[in-house]
Amino acid sequence: MSGTETPAPFDVALIARSAEWIAQSSGLLIAAGAGMGVDSGLADFRGTEGFWRAYPPLRQAGLRFEEIANPRTFDDDPGLAWGFYGHRLRTYRETRPHRGFAILRALAGRLADGAFVVTSNVDGHFQKAGFAPDALCEVHGSIHHLQCLEPCSPRIWTADAFAPEVDAANCRLVSLVSPPPSCPHCGEIARPNILMFGDGGWLAQRAEEQEKRFMAWRERAARPVIIELGAGKAVATIRRMSERMKLPLIRINPRDPEVPAGQIGIKAGALATLEAIQTALAKTGFLPERAGQAER
């Protein structure tokens, strides 16, 4: 798994400008990609080599992320498919969100319109960090919810009862200990309610309801600012959304910080940048200096 990003030297002027934009806004639109989880110790699957470093057995099998994260794999080899997703489910359950999540919550708590999260991450870490489920839009779904592979019905249910045991050396579900989950309606194998590659069977209604709540928040939020964290170019859903909103944008990304004219791009990791912004805002009295410290 990837470790934390080494923070780059900060442009003090950009940090100060970001802090000013946030303090003058009415709310935060938090737009998060896979890089948001890197400081928690999660892999971001950046490129084929990055993915294979996280899952060496799949390198040996010659399987790329686009091939294992595909509903066809659940048809062809459910033990392998659930080995991959079961390992991720356990990892996300066991990993503690980094302190940056708490800093964002503290920032939102100071603003009249609070915050709304739009994320391509499926890890559930914003909920785990205390963000309200009704202020969250998971555009690619959630690993913590299941659906029928077929699907035989529009039903989506929680994965809470599934405790996968995975043979990590082979990336396979230990089926005698924890068989793949099944659809309670037809008995077919269940899959995560996640938008995969080549996916014509994803049940999107949960994400669509979240999107409706997001658009309602956007309509009533007076002067929101976007703070985008770890959203790369390979799967550019979040980056495109941020730019389409035509709002003040603070883009935090250690590799791809480029922004449209007039916006802020900071070439650094999420946690280090949020801590720097917190420090800048603490100096003005806008935010307590110790905000989020309990999350260390």
Image (cartoon, rainbow, N blue to C red):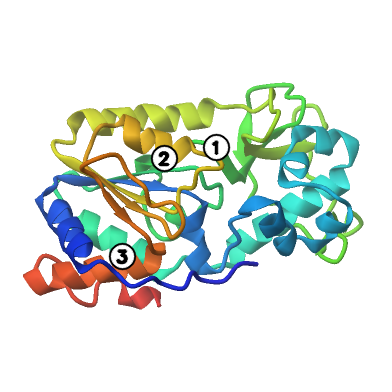
The alpha-carbon separation of the residues under discs 2 and 1 comes to 14 Å
In this view, 241 is above or below 126: above
Secondary structure beneath disc 1?
Answer: loop
Q: Residues within 10 Å of mark 1 (few under 14, many from 20)?
A: some
Q: Which residue is mark 3?
A: 274
Q: Position of residue 75 (x, y in %)?
A: 86, 33
25 or 254: nearer the viewer = 254
Residue 32 seen by the camera: yes
| Residue kind at label 1, given as amino acid type | His
* Residue matched to label 1: 140
Secondary structure under the numbered disc 2 in the rendered image:
helix
Distance of mark 3 from mark 1, alpha carbons? 25 Å
Quarter of the image where one finds residue 23:
bottom left
**In front here: 45 or 260?**
260
The residue depicted at 63 percent of the width and 54 percent of the height is: 45
Residue on which disc 2 sits: 239
Q: Label 3 amino acid?
A: Leu
Q: Which marked residue is nearer to the observer: mark 3 or mark 1? A: 3
Earlier in the chain: of badge 3 and badge 1, it is 1
Q: CA gap, disc 2 to disc 3? A: 19 Å
> At 43% across and 60% down in the image, what residue appears?
254
